[in-house]
Image (cartoon, rainbow, N blue to C red):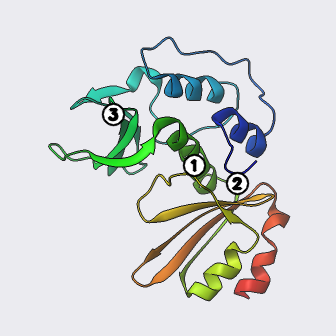
Amino acid sequence: MIGAWTVPGFLRWWYGEPDLAGARPAAALPGALLDLHEALSRHSVAHDGLLAPRDVRADDGVLVFWVERRGLYEWGAGPDGLVRRRTALRGEPWHRTGAPLAEFLVSLLVHEAVVGARYRAYADDLSPGRRDLLLDPLRPLPLPGPTAGSRLYAGEHLLALAGERGGTSWVHLAARRPGDLQYLEAVLG
């Protein structure tokens, strides 16, 4: 399953079968964004920062579809189908991420699942050895991460977002059930 995820496939794996009727938005958006919104309309999940189809806007030839929680960064789809990122300040230029829109949207969902999980843990100031122990039950995803300098991971019942800052590592872990995080006691204890 890892690496072959689609938007509906990830939503089903992490959140379960769709629980709503859903609807395809009536908006002039790239197909991948329409597919994302249609799939999300079938699940009772909220996603911070993802703009509603009516709020997606063009800015310097880029369709802005996601604004980071604090409003500091935004992401958009370029005319070439690749995602761009910039600081959300007037006049800031867009920077190409190199990620195709469809793949990026899956990584966006994984990222949002990690930071919005009901059962989650966070550790920072980790040595590389401790970071590796925390991530041992997971494997890196071959998806472009939505945030610079971070990497997404998945395991049987876990997701993670990990990165480095100032010579040490940090890890956000997410689980579907609280018992899935019990292994942390042995690693961090």
Q: Quadrant of the C terminus?
A: bottom right
Disc marking residue 118: 2
Q: Is residue 53 visible?
A: yes
* Extreme-top residue of the structure: 26
From the viewer's side, name the closer residue of 97 and 159: 97
The image shows residue 44, relative to residue 129, as above or below, that is above
Sequence order check, earlier mark of 1 and 2: 1
What residue appears at the point 43 percent right and 85 percent down from the top-left corner?
167
Disc 2 residue type (three-letter):
Arg
SS under mark 1: helix
Disc 1 residue type (three-letter):
Glu
Please report contact status of discs 3 and 2: CB closer than 8 Å, yes or no.
Answer: no
Disc marking residue 112: 1
Q: Is residue 71 visible?
A: no
Q: Residue 43's x, y, as percent?
A: 70, 31
The image shows residue 162, relative to residue 106, as above or below, that is below
Is 29 on the left or on the right of 17, as rendered? left
Which mark is in front, 1 or 2?
Answer: 1
Is 183 on the left or on the right of 121, as rendered? right
What residue appears at the point 21 percent right and 47 percent down from the top-left corner?
89
User: Which residue lies under the disc numbered 3?
Assistant: 78
What residue appears at the point 50 percent right and 55 percent down from the top-left corner?
145
SS under mark 3: loop
Sequence order check, earlier mark of 3 and 1: 3
What residue appears at the point 58 percent right and 56 percent down from the top-left corner?
115
**Residue 106 figure quarter:** top right
Q: Residue 137's x, y, as percent?
A: 76, 70
